[in-house]
Image (tube, rainbow, N blue to C red):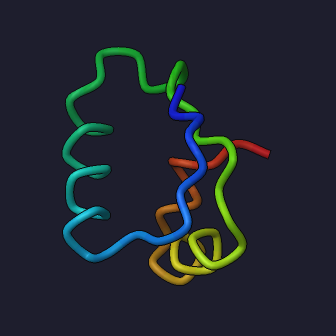
């Protein structure tokens, strides 16, 4: 679980998150929490919210 507050994410940060997510054996155990509205908007725009955020 990634739980630190994240006020901003760059394209490089998105790439790292994607590489990390792809390397997980059990992707269902990964969850991002404490995501700011700005970061949430970026994740939604890029489609990353579909696999990085759980509602």
Asked if residue 39 is positioned above or below residue 18 in the image, the reply reads below
Q: Residue at x 31, y 75 (%)?
A: 10
Q: Quick one: which residue is furthest to the right in this view?
A: 55
Q: Quadrant of residue 21?
A: top left
Q: How many marks?
A: 0
Q: Residue at x 21, y 52 (%)?
A: 16
21 sits to left or right of 40: left
Pick the front one: 2 or 47: 2
Q: Residue at x 57, y 71 (%)?
A: 39
Give the image location of residue 20, x and y in percent.
25, 38
Q: Residue at x 54, y 25 (%)?
A: 1
34 sits to left or right of 4: right
Give the image location of residue 24, x and y in percent.
29, 24
Asked if residue 32 is positioned above or below residue 12 in the image, the reply reads above
Q: Quadrant of residue 28?
A: top right
Give the image location of residue 36, x and y in percent.
67, 65
Pick the front one: 53 or 13: 13
């Amino acid at each position: 679980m990634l739980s630190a507050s994240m006020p901003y994410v760059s394209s490089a940060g998105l790439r790292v998150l994607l590489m990390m997510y792809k390397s997980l054996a059990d992707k269902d155990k990964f969850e991002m929490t404490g995501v700011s509205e700005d970061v949430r908007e970026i994740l939604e725009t890029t489609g990353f919210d579909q696999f990085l955020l759980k509602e």
